[in-house]
Amino acid sequence: ASPPRPRAGAGCAAGAEGPPPAAASTVTNWTVLGKSFMGVFIAEWGDRTQIAMIGQHASQPLVPVFLGSAVAFFLLTLSAVAAAALLNGQKLRERVIMGFSACCFAVFGLLALKDAVYDSAS
């Protein structure tokens, strides 16, 4: 009879059993945190939203502007992460994503146009 096959993920060294040390996952978590931070920081630097917050702070108090924008950005990020968790493992074509984004953009554009027409009429 042949010897039993090792479990998937089991160590190859004699006596190596169990999951990898916790330090390895901590390094990975810090790496992911750093990459996420830098990706968002670089992408948002000089963005129109940042310029809008500078303009808003020019006429309004710092703390409410900061807290309002921080909570809004947190909720937007949370919704993006939740959507990614729901779609994890799904096969999505880029065309579907672009189509969905275009539809959202069109709806927001129509709402802005409606507001502009309504404001100019009153």
Image: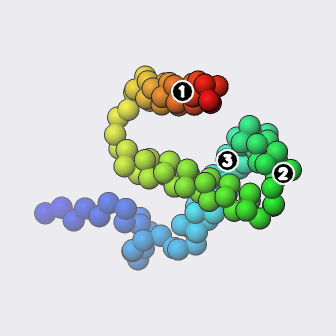
The quarter holding residue 34 reads bottom right
Q: Provide the residue designation for mark 2.
A: 59
Which of the two discs, 2 and 1, labels the residue nearer the N terminus? 2
Q: Provide the residue designation for mark 1.
A: 114
In this view, the residue in front, 43 or 16, is: 43
What's the residue at 84%, 51% (across, down)? 59
**Furthest residue to the bottom?**
15
Tell whether label 1 touches label 3 (CB within 8 Å): no
User: Mark 2 to mark 1: distance in Å?
Assistant: 27 Å
In the picture, the quarter occupied by the N terminus is bottom left
In the displayed structure image, the side of residue 43 where residue 17 appears, left or right = left
What's the residue at 51%, 73% (across, down)? 21
What's the residue at 72%, 48% (across, down)? 41
**What residue type is disc 2 on?**
Ser
The answer to whether residue 98 of the structure is visible from this angle is no
Q: Provide the residue designation for mark 3.
A: 40
The quarter holding residue 121 reads top right
In this view, the residue in front, 3 or 32, is: 32
Residue 114 x, y percent position in the rendering: 54, 27
User: Mark 2 to mark 3: distance in Å?
Assistant: 27 Å
Residue 81 x, y percent position in the rendering: 49, 52
Does dot 1 land on a helix, a strand or a loop?
A: helix
Which of the two discs, 3 and 1, labels the residue nearer the N terminus? 3
**What residue type is disc 1 on?**
Lys
Which of the two discs, 2 and 3, labels the residue nearer the N terminus? 3
In the picture, the quarter occupied by the C terminus is top right
User: Mark 3 to mark 1: distance in Å?
Assistant: 32 Å
